Amino acid sequence: MTTTEPWSGREGTVEEHRRAGSGGAAGGPSPGGTARERSPGGAAPADPSPPWARRVAVVAGAMMVGGAGLNTYMTLARPGSYAGMGGWFQEISPWDLGPLPALWEATFGEHPRVAVPVVGIGFEATIGLLALSRDPRRRAAGLGGIAAFHTALLGMGLWAWALPWLGVLVPAAVVTARAARR
């Protein structure tokens, strides 16, 4: 049976592909890895993490990338909208947030074009893209970053949003990290 390698476009039988080894266009390793790393037939190895954890990573990663996009728009179009959020966090929090509202006002409120790109765009986009990665190690790092982000939201009083997310993110990050070690 003749097949085509998806990474190089070469045709040949499965046995010919195995004998040829990795052989990319310039004779170096191909994006699919070496012949030993690939499963029979040239496909990439199966992802060891459970499907439910991969779905959690896709949803959470897309949400974080979308949040980074929204923060990009808000920073460009309405940077002043971040100014009142520190006081709003204090209003909805079940306890006194201490210096957090003042810290928010001093950073995000007074300098939204500096603080928001670092945290609200850079960090959110990075952990979102990591969570969307096909590599289970990167995906576990992304899920861990998203869990850390939601833990910070707990500290700001957003319990109704962050707690259910943490209930799903933490187990997904743990099983993905364990699967990546295998």
Image (spheres, grey):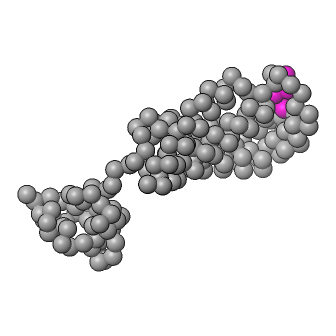
The image position of residue 148, as x and y in percent, is 68, 42
Range of magenta residues: 86-91
The image position of residue 59, as x and y in percent, is 50, 35
Q: Is residue 115 magenta?
A: no
Residue name at image x 87 percent, y 37 percent: 100
Residue name at image x 63 percent, y 46 percent: 145
Dividing the picture into quadrants, the one containing residue 101 is: top right
Residue name at image x 55 percent, y 43 percent: 174
Q: Relative to 180, is 150 on the left or the right? A: right
**Farthest residue toward the bottom?**
27
Looking at this view, is 116 or 3 the one in front? 3
For residue 77, say whether it is visible.
no
Instruction: Say if 181 sits above or below 77 in the image.
Output: below
The image position of residue 71, as x and y in percent, is 67, 39
The image position of residue 10, as x and y in percent, is 19, 66
Which quadrant, please, contains the C terminus?
A: bottom left
Q: Relative to 119, is 65 on the left or the right? A: left
Looking at this view, is 92 or 82 the one in front? 92
